Image (cartoon, helix red, strand yellow):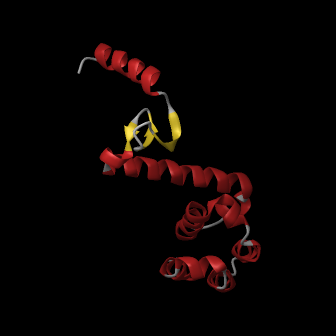
Amino acid sequence: MEAKLLERIKEQLVRHEGLRLKPYRCTSGKLTIGIGRNLDANGISQTEAFMLLEHDILQCEMQILAEIPKIYLQLDEVRKSVLLNMCFNLGIGGLLEFNNTLAYVAAGDWERAANGMLASKWAKQVGRRAIELSELMRKGK
């Protein structure tokens, strides 16, 4: 497609469809997002899913760095991944509720940090995920 045509149709569709950054039901009842993207019929591609995932991970890291930089920056890659995973799952607010666990992480007390993770309501909700992440926190590998 020619660049000029692509720009023309994009402008038209934005004008006609509008831009909605959260899912909504269009006039025909289809779950829609963005500029008329029919999620019921089209969903998203694997490439789009991984693009969104990468964006969300980077957002989590920015939030963690804004809230607990001293804890996060001193961690190895494995333990950083645990905090990123928890932030992705719980949101930054949920992660920050792990006061004792984060204090143990800051102190390098991996055993207590892992035990704190497992003793949470979150661990009961996510099951195997919590077991895996707590072991990564405990062992660093």
Above or below: residue 1 compared with residue 92: above
Give the number of callouts.
Answer: 0
Residue 63 in sight: yes
In the image, taking residue 76 as reference, residue 42 lies left or right, namely left
113 or 36, which is in the foreground?
36
In the rendered image, which quarter is residue 29 located in? top left
13 or 66, which is in the foreground?
13
Question: What residue appears at the point 39 percent right and 23 percent down from the top-left corner?
Answer: 13
81 or 93, which is in the foreground?
93
Question: What residue appears at the point 52 percent right and 83 percent down from the top-left corner?
Answer: 131
Q: Position of residue 98 (x, y in %)?
A: 72, 72
In the image, taking residue 46 as reference, residue 60 lies left or right, namely right
Q: Position of residue 84 (x, y in %)?
A: 57, 62
In the image, taking residue 10 as reference, residue 110 lies left or right, namely right
In the rendered image, which quarter is residue 11 located in? top left
Question: What residue appears at the point 58 percent right and 82 percent down from the top-left corner?
Answer: 124
Question: What residue appears at the point 63 percent right and 50 percent down from the top-left corner?
Answer: 62
Above or below: residue 11 compared with residue 124: above
Q: Where is the N terminus found, in terms of image quarters?
A: top left
Above or below: residue 53 compared with residue 86: above
Q: Position of residue 107 (x, y in %)?
A: 74, 76
